[in-house]
Image (spheres, grey):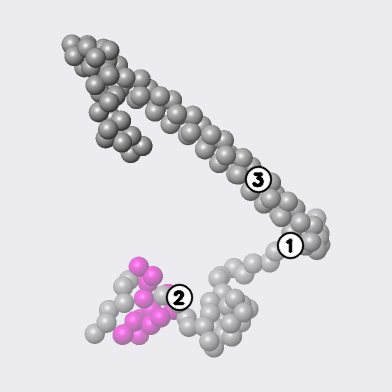
Amino acid sequence: MFLDIAPSEFLLTAVVAVVVIGPKDLPRAMRTAGKWMAKMRRVSGHFRSGIETMIREAELEDMEKKWREQNEAIMKAQAPVAALPSEVTVHAPTEPLHVGEVGYEGHGAAHSDVPSTDVAHHQAPHGEAKSPSQPEILS
């Protein structure tokens, strides 16, 4: 705070303040000066934060504009998707297909590479089918 003031300058200022203001009113004058300094710091801090907020908002607007332009360029570069017919009939099996059954498409993997994860088709140790809620017991 007082880095720019040399000790001799500070001493001279203190002596002048004591002579001009007087020792009786000096504490009140220092308190008043401190209040003004605090008020100036608050105002400058508020001003600085307002400027930083404006800069941040301007940067965000620039980024959003850039992203919007990139998005439009990407959308224009993509080939238009062929429109589907107005009536599409979907034939779903009555029972769900499981891994290893005919018609199951395991996300591009070969049927033999995909292990079965259906709990209902695993066999219990005694040959009876387990229900999905029945936990597997390891012995």
Horizontal and vertical percent for residue 87? 78, 57
- In depth, the one of 85 and 45 nearer the eye is 45
Query: Which residues lie in the magenta part?
Result: 120-133
Callout 1, which amino acid? Thr
| Left or right of 96, for residue 73 | right
Distance between mark 1 and mark 2 Cα atoms: 28 Å
**Mark 2 touches mark 3? (CB < 8 Å):** no
Q: What element carries label 2?
A: loop
Q: Which residue does the numbered mark 2 point to in the structure image?
A: 118
Q: Disc 2 to disc 3, how far (Cα)?
A: 51 Å
**Secondary structure at numbered mark 1:** loop
Q: In which quarter of the image is residue 38?
A: top left
Using the image, determine if residue 69 lies above or below residue 82: above
Q: Which quadrant is home to the C terminus?
A: bottom left
Q: What element carries label 3?
A: helix
User: What label sits on residue 62 in the rendered view?
Assistant: 3
Write down the quadrant of residue 30 in the picture: top left
Dominant secondary structure of the residues highlighted in magenta in the image: loop
Question: Disc 2 residue type?
Answer: Asp
The residue at the point 37 percent across, 72 percent down is 131
Q: In this view, does 28 lie above or below 129?
A: above
Is 127 one of the magenta-colored residues?
yes
> Which residue carries the number 1 mark?
89
**What type is the residue that disc 3 sits on?**
Asp
The residue at the far bottom in this view is 112
Name the residue at 31% across, 77% down.
136
- Say left or right for 32 vs 60: left
